[in-house]
Amino acid sequence: MLKEGVDIVTIIRFYISCYFGCQPGVKAVAFLGLVFLILSPVIEVIFIKLMVDGFLEVASVSGEVDIGYGFYALLALALFVVYSIGYASRIGRIRYVNHVVEMLEVRGVNVHKSHKAWMRAVLVEATQILTWITQILAILSIAVYMDAFMSLPLVVMVLVASLLGAWLFSDQVYRQRRLKYNKRDGADRVASMKVHSRVKSVELMGVVANVLALVCFMFFVVMVMEGYIGPDVGVVFIFIARIFKMTLSAVGGSLMRLARASVYSEKGIEKAVGFGRF
């Protein structure tokens, strides 16, 4: 019984099936929201690069940094717009998830109420993970464009964390399914074991992300001190490593929640995937 159930491929098929089962207007809004969520950290990186370039240019000409209040006001306004639309997109993501789950009944997919809640959780976590992964790839493309060789530590950081995340996800699915069918221990003990298993995996992912980020920080600082890269590139790359550290840690938590939700919504997901074209 532990070998039955959904895997990551089935979850992807379920996500695609739900998206294409929406009304055209909802699909367009969901796509635009996802695009903006992806672009938000990219815009932040560009802002940091422009700000550092401005500081260094003014300092090199006058010997002191005095950009003026206009620059700061424009930067603050742009960041406010980016964060505001990003927040609205996150709120809209919940409405989108509720819509696609309700559309299952319209399409003739009968799902038990207990499975619906977990299917919502699967869609929420899958959407968040998709957004974070695409954000990382977009920012990584900027880093490679700026300096392909110096971006290698960032590439290694993402690859190592991705492999670890995939292994932890598979392991957590197995553990959660084993605990789901655990009839030997009491309900309180099983619930405690479920939480402990997820937290331990999340903490491991966070520790690895922090260690990888620290290595990248030290590498970029040494490269700037030795003159291999300019201070502007070094600051931007350190900022990118910090973004990756926070994002990869968050991905770890989301992966563990996705593993738990997928185990408890297996029958509903299998019905939705079997009914659709995917």
Image (cartoon, grey):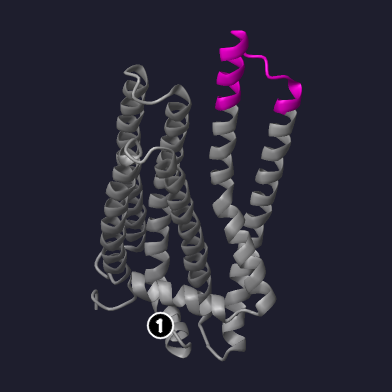
Q: Nearer the viewer, residue 4 or 208?
A: 208
Q: Is residue 265 visible?
A: no
Residue 57 x %, y %? 58, 20
Up the image or down, 265 lies above or below 88; here it is below
Image quadrant of residue 5? bottom left
* Residue beneath the point at 64% across and 50% down: 86
Q: Which contiguous range is marked in magenta?
A: 52-72
Whether residue 185 sits left or right of residue 251 in the image: it is left
Give the dominant element type of the magenta stretch: helix, strand or loop: helix
Image quadrant of residue 178? bottom left
Residue located farthest toward the front when viewing the structure as drawn: 61
Q: Nearer the viewer, residue 95 or 236?
A: 236
Q: How many marks?
A: 1
Residue 165 x %, y %? 31, 54
Q: Would you say residue 133 sits in the magenta stretch?
A: no
Please tell me how crowded label 1 is: few (under 14), some (14-19), or many (20+) other residues with Cα within 10 Å: some
Whether residue 176 sits left or right of residue 14 in the image: it is left
Residue 219 x %, y %? 31, 28
- SS class, disc 1: helix
Whether residue 207 sits left or right of residue 45 in the image: it is left
Q: Nearer the viewer, residue 66 or 44?
A: 66
Q: Is residue 238 visible?
A: yes
Up the image or down, 132 lies above or below 122; here it is above
Location of the C terminus by quadrant is bottom left
Location of the N terminus by quadrant is bottom left
Kindly identify the amino acid type of the residue bearing the numbered disc 1.
Answer: Glu
Q: Nearer the viewer, residue 12 or 44?
A: 44
Q: Would you say residue 71 sits in the magenta stretch?
A: yes
Which residue is labeled 1 in the image? Answer: 270
* Residue beneath the point at 62% across and 68% down: 96
